[in-house]
Image (tube, rainbow, N blue to C red):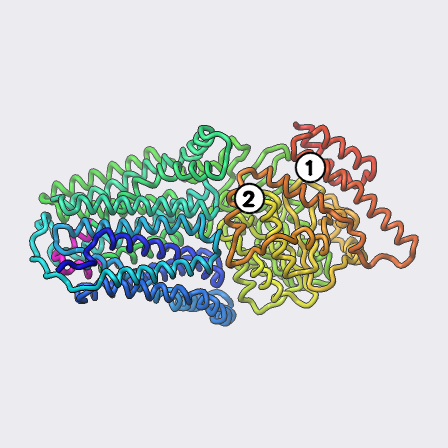
């Protein structure tokens, strides 16, 4: 009797969808869990380790079952149905995890081994059930489809390849389309519906009686099949192959971020191409493994080839920036689609060959390790479990040991050395003449290391990244590769003069240019000047330490700083002492290496002022620091008269994105004001939210200039009186609400900005359009003032001076708009009007604007 489930195309179609949903869940669930556990590398590694550990456990457990059940396809259908049901309830589980995580965090103060173990167990409680079920699908379908030894390699290879191809589509569709259209919750529901459909179709296919089992027969490569004594060797090979493959993925991700930027699309592109290579490799191996007569030697050759390709790969990385530039010129005017195509071509030519080689390993090992097709379920289950455990080890070792201790280049050399060792071991064990095999292996290894040290320069892949190119007026002073990021300090020479830049993964986060110094200082001063007697401050994002120092000039009792990267703090202490004045030595300052949002979520402390000074929301992982949900968390941690300050850029955001964030902010903090530090041309705003009534106390500002340290620090950026601070005002709470009236909310469920802003190509155009938009909505600060003198003449004198500053600023801002358009003659004309109306108001900007124009 013919069994319905024997239709290979139908089963492969189901397993394609299974791979699709698995990666859909991985992307979305990790986003959910990062909101709970934080976006640190330690938290993310914990999540990935649990996810992959569940796959390994499921593969092992169901592999043992697969060879014993009468109908493995029906059990597969049941697993898919259970995965779908779990997915439907998963958003509620993640929400419930918060109530468990917060007391654990507070009990152990968010650090220590026991805290890390507790976080791991909580993560396991959520992720292990579905990932164990996912891990069981491959051995079950392998046992279902493999009916004789002669097609074992082909069917396992095709299964693995098609499932991985489904994962590719899952990555691309989820990152590029589904989250953007539906948000996290509806994307999960879509995945659950697909799982339930897989259950229904697989269950339908599984009906009917099993056909009689064919005789065992002999595989064409049965002579190469290992004896039971050699089985541990294959486990060792697949374990370390998995470790090396994931270590390479970690290294490649770190390097490609420097070339492509840290957007959600760049990571999805890299992961998608990685999976495409694995899929192609698996399909190729499936084709050859049933026919080739010397599989162990082929496996040995693959390991040696992977090692040698490292040398080519490093050279490819060193020329990637110029290749991307050449492709950009070839395709002409830039666009989002062209940018993705150029990135795909650049990444693909580096990754496709090594990932194909990696993808060929598993099917070949399965063919070698399965002596009887009737045991294919347990063989696949055990070997896939070892492979996945190796992946966990490789990921952790690369991220936490090799990169921080040796850097990316030396870390990849260690991984390549593992490939060489595996090739040597396989050739020695399976080679017919041991002595000759030893000599060949030794020669291959010696030639590899000679080639590496002759042709590869130290840190070649990192230093060659376009962001460090001296052609762009940058000189690399230092770079540090910690577990979180590549942190660099560059000396930059441009129209603003010579200055230092502090960058994380190539993204500027602080510096000593006039515009950066001004915004860093005012980010610290402005919220403190607008509140009465602030004592306890939370500062998210240390940067160069300039903001923290400005806060320390005020009479505060404690400054808590949340910084995610130790490398940033190290660079700030070494190169930016002139900006931060050694503020970390201040006894009031308490630094914690933690994700800022996670601290806000879990801490029991309440603050007078929260400074949210994070990286641009377009970069992967940072959008969650600009959502309405994040602002609600901040509001819960502010005292009754508290103030929150949000750094909000104008560049690389659409006007809709800028308004989306601002509307989310004002919906939580109705007493919101927007400020632009106009004493330099800069693409930044500061948004202030207050818990109490939003009037601005002039008397409070005026008194601040009697504080010696505050006055001296403000004078460093040319601010010598309170009128200049009032001059930075753009919009009050009523004007802000009118400005953002039609914008949607930016939420954790629909983190649109992280996706939409990554599509902005023209940084300067977006800066100009957003700046023009807020200038057009600028209002006078006078209706928002309180604390003016009661004596009429004195009050009128103050108001007249404020109006004179505001009039001068009107021309100042017009000049800046002309400057951004490149009309320098008209910009000069507007700034000359400033000189005529209010000479005082030009002084802080003259060194910047006029100096730049003279150079041009």
- Residue 139 against residue 252 in the figure, above or below: below
- Residue 292 against residue 23 in the figure, above or below: above
196 in magenta: no
Question: Looking at the magenta stretch, what is its main secondary structure?
Answer: helix
Residue 229 shown left or right of residue 104 in the figure: left
Residue 48: x and y in percent read: 38, 58
Labelled disc at residue 817 = 1
Q: Which residue is mark 2?
A: 508
Residue 220 shown left or right of residue 40 in the figure: left
Residue 582 seen in render? no
Residue 159: x and y in percent read: 24, 52
Q: Looking at this view, is 323 or 650 the one in front? A: 650
Tell me the residue at 46%/60% (across/down).
Answer: 185
Residue 783 seen in render? yes
Give the mark toward the camera: 1 or 2.
1
User: How far, Cα to Cα, is label 1 from label 2?
Assistant: 23 Å
Q: Which part of the image, by quadrant, shows the C terminus? A: top right
Tell me the residue at 33%/43% (across/down).
Answer: 413
Q: Which numbered disc flags the more N-terminal residue, 1 or 2? A: 2
Q: How many marks?
A: 2
Q: Looking at this view, is 282 or 735 the one in front? A: 735
368 in magenta: yes
* Residue 548 location, quadrant: bottom right
Q: Helix, strand, or loop for circle 2?
A: strand
Range of residues picked out in magenta: 364-380
Residue 555: x and y in percent read: 71, 60
């Amino acid at each position: 009797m013919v069994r319905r489930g024997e239709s290979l195309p139908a089963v492969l179609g189901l397993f394609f969808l299974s791979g699709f949903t698995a990666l859909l869940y991985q992307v979305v669930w990790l986003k959910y869990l990062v909101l709970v556990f934080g976006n640190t590398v330690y938290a993310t590694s914990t999540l990935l380790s649990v996810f992959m550990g569940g796959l390994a456990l499921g593969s092992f457990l169901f592999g043992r079952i697969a060879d014993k059940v009468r109908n493995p396809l029906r059990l597969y259908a049941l697993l898919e149905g259970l995965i779908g049901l779990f997915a439907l309830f998963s958003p509620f589980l993640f929400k419930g995890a918060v109530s468990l995580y917060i007391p654990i965090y507070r009990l152990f103060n968010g650090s220590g081994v026991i805290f890390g173990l507790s976080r791991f167990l909580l993560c396991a409680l959520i992720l292990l059930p579905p990932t164990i079920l996912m891990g069981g699908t491959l051995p079950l379908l392998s046992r279902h489809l493999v009916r004789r030894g002669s097609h074992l390699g082909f069917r396992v290879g095709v299964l693995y390849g098609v499932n991985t191809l489904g994962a590719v589509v899952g990555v691309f569709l989820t990152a590029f389309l589904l989250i953007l259209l539906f948000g996290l919750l509806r994307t999960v529901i879509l995945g659950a519906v697909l799982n339930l459909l897989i259950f229904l179709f697989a269950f339908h296919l599984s009906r009917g009686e099993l056909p009689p089992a064919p005789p065992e027969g002999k595989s064409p490569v049965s002579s190469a099949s290992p004896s039971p004594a050699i089985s541990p060797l294959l486990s060792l090979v697949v374990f370390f192959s998995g470790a090396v493959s994931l270590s390479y993925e970690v290294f490649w991700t770190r390097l490609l971020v420097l070339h492509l930027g840290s957007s959600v699309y760049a990571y999805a592109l890299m992961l998608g191409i990685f999976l495409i290579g694995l899929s192609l490799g698996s399909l190729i191996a499936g084709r050859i493994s049933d026919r080739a007569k010397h599989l162990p030697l082929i496996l040995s050759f693959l390991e040696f080839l992977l090692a040698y390709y490292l040398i080519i790969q490093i050279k490819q990385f060193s020329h990637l920036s110029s290749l991307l530039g050449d492709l950009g010129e070839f395709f002409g005017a830039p666009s989002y689609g062209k940018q993705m195509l150029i990135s795909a071509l650049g990444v693909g030519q580096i990754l496709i060959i090594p990932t194909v080689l990696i993808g060929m390993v598993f099917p070949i090992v399965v063919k070698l390790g399965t002596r009887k097709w009737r045991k294919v379920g347990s063989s696949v289950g055990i070997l896939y479990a070892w492979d996945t455990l190796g992946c966990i080890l490789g990921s952790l070792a690369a991220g936490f040991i090799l990169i921080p201790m040796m850097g990316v280049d030396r870390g990849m050399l260690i991984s390549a050395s593992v490939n060489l060792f595996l090739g040597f071991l396989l050739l020695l064990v399976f080679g017919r003449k041991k002595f000759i095999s030893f000599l060949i292996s030794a020669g291959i290894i010696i030639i590899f290391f000679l080639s590496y040290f002759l042709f590869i320069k130290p840190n070649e892949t990192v230093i060659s990244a376009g962001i460090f190119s001296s052609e762009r007026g940058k000189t690399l002073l230092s770079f540090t590769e910690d577990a979180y990021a590549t942190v660099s300090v560059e000396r930059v020479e441009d129209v603003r003069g010579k200055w230092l830049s502090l960058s994380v993964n190539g993204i500027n986060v602080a510096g000593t240019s006039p515009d950066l110094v001004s915004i860093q200082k005012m980010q610290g001063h402005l919220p403190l000047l607008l509140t009465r007697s602030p004592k306890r401050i939370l500062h998210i994002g240390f940067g160069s330490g300039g903001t923290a120092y400005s806060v320390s000039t005020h009479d505060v009792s404690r400054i808590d700083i949340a910084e995610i990267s130790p490398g940033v703090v190290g660079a700030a202490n070494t190169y930016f002492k002139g900006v931060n004045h050694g503020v970390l030595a201040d006894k009031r300052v308490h630094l914690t290496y933690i994700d800022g949002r996670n601290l806000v979520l879990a801490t029991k402390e309440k603050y007078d002022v929260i400074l949210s000074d994070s990286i641009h929301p377009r970069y992967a992982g940072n959008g969650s620091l600009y959502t309405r949900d994040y602002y609600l968390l901040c509001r819960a941690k502010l005292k009754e008269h508290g103030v929150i300050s949000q750094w909000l850029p104008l560049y690389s955001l659409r006007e809709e994105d800028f308004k989306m964030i601002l509307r989310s902010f004002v919906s939580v903090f109705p007493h919101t004001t927007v400020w632009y530090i106009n004493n330099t041309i800069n693409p930044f705003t500061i948004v202030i939210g207050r818990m109490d009534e939003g009037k601005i106390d002039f008397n409070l500002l005026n008194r601040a200039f009697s504080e010696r340290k505050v006055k001296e620090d403000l004078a460093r950026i040319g601010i010598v009186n309170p009128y200049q601070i009032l001059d930075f005002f753009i919009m009050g709470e009523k004007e802000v609400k009118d400005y953002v009236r039609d914008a949607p909310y930016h939420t954790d469920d629909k983190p649109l900005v992280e996706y939409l802003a990554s599509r902005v190509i023209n940084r300067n155009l977006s800066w100009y359009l957003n700046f023009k938009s807020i200038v057009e909505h600028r209002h006078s600060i006078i209706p928002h003032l309180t604390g003016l003198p009661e004596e009429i003449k004195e009050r009128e004198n103050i108001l007249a001076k404020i109006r004179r500053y505001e009039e001068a600023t009107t021309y100042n801002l017009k000049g800046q708009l002309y400057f951004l358009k490149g009309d320098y003659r008209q910009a000069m004309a507007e700034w000359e009007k400033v000189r005529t109306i209010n000479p005082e108001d030009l002084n802080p900007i003259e060194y910047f604007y006029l100096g730049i124009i003279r150079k041009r």
